[in-house]
Image (tube, rainbow, N blue to C red):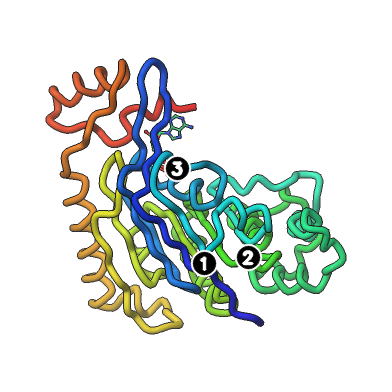
């Protein structure tokens, strides 16, 4: 299996959205560097701009300022070349298609519909052997997530972007998928960027955990994770693992205590009132107003 992976360099990115009469600055001064074949996890309070950052890196949205570079190519170029695989929280599979046909869809979109071996290999790699012909409704939530990851990987992308892909799953299934994700990443060497709310998950799978500030989000702490690979479940019980989790956790709490810059406009005024009452703006205070 070939090792592939694009570097990702994000420098000084800002993104502001119009919201009602005002605007919301989701990201400002956001920097990120993932080396080729690296595995980076992004954590931060709700509403701090993680999904926004991932959408920008995916080429699904454009920054208002700053730059995003992947070895000389823009996210949009990479996306058009189908060199970016994306799996988000909702696996969004086509219900009338089988497991194999859902995975094959990504190949069909790039005119490679006859590569049956690639589909079969991915089905094995994500542990879905025997379920090739099953429809999404006949699978568990964890199995549907595996199909989504297989579909994101089948075109052998240079970059894999995962936005809380296991958020809705129970702890045991989630751990199992983390093991599989690590195994797939080791086999493929695809540069991977994972957004998660779980600090243990981030520390278990990633080479580096980046902690974001509340909105406008930027990276405020970088935590390299040096545990040997393959990481096994024994690591979850080790003192070094717990202390790494606590270090990241403390860093996240510190970041949450940072002053949040209020956004201009009517919605921001409402936030300011709330901030006066509590002393801080609750993370994601404006989520309800989001499209
Ligand atoms: N299309 C949009 N239009 C207006 N505002 C948006 C849009 N997308 C995101 N936002 C705003 O940008 C901010 C960051 O949103 P984002 O979804 O990136 O947060 P997040 O860190 O992924 O949060 P969570 O952890 O809850 O998923 C939020 O305040 C949100 O309201
Ligand atoms: Mg999000």
- Which residue is under mark 1? 71
The one nearer the camera, 41 or 91, is 41
Q: Position of residue 269 (x, y in %)?
A: 24, 18
Q: Position of residue 129 (x, y in %)?
A: 73, 70
Mark 2 vs mark 3, CA separation in Å: 22 Å
Numbered tag placed on residue 157 in the rendering:
2
Can residue 201 be seen here? no
Q: Position of residue 267 (x, y in %)?
A: 32, 19
What residue is rendered at 21% in x and 45% in y?
256
Q: Earlier in the sequence, mark 2 or mark 1?
A: 1
Q: Position of residue 282 (x, y in %)?
A: 25, 33
Q: Are marks 3 and 1 in contact (CB under 8 Å)?
A: no
Mark 3 vs mark 1, CA separation in Å: 18 Å
Ligand 2's quadrant is: top left
Is 17 on the left-hand or right-hand side of 62?
Answer: left
Numbered tag placed on residue 63 in the rendering:
3
The one nearer the camera, 21 or 230, is 21
């Amino acid at each position: 299996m070939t090792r592939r992976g694009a570097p990702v360099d994000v420098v000084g990115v800002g993104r502001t959205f119009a919201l009602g009469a005002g605007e919301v600055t989701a990201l400002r001064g956001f920097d990120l560097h993932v080396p080729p074949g690296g595995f980076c996890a992004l954590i931060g309070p709700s509403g701090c701009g993680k999904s926004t950052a991932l959408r920008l890196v995916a080429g699904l949205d454009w920054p208002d300022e700053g730059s995003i570079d992947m070895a000389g190519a823009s996210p949009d170029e990479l996306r058009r070349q189908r060199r970016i695989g994306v799996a988000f929280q909702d696996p969004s599979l086509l219900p009338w298609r089988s497991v194999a046909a859902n995975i094959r869809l990504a190949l069909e979109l790039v005119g490679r519909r006859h590569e049956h071996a690639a589909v079969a290999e991915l089905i094995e790699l994500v542990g879905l052997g025997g379920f090739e012909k099953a429809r999404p409704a006949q699978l568990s939530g964890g199995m549907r997530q595996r199909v989504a990851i297989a579909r994101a990987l089948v075109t052998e992308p240079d970059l894999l972007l995962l936005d809380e892909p296991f958020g809705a799953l129970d702890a045991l299934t989630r751990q199992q998928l983390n093991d599989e994700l690590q195994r797939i990443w080791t086999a493929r060497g695809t540069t991977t960027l994972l957004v998660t709310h779980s600090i243990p998950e981030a520390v278990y799978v990633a080479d580096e955990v980046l902690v974001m500030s509340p909105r406008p989000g930027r990276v405020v702490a970088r935590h390299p994770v040096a545990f040997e690979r393959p990481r096994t479940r024994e690591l979850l019980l080790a003192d070094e693992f717990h202390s790494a989790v606590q270090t990241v956790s403390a860093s996240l709490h510190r970041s949450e205590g940072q002053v949040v810059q209020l956004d201009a406009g009517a919605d921001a005024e409402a936030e300011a009132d709330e901030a006066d009452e509590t002393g801080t703006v609750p993370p994601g205070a404006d989520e309800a107003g989001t499209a």
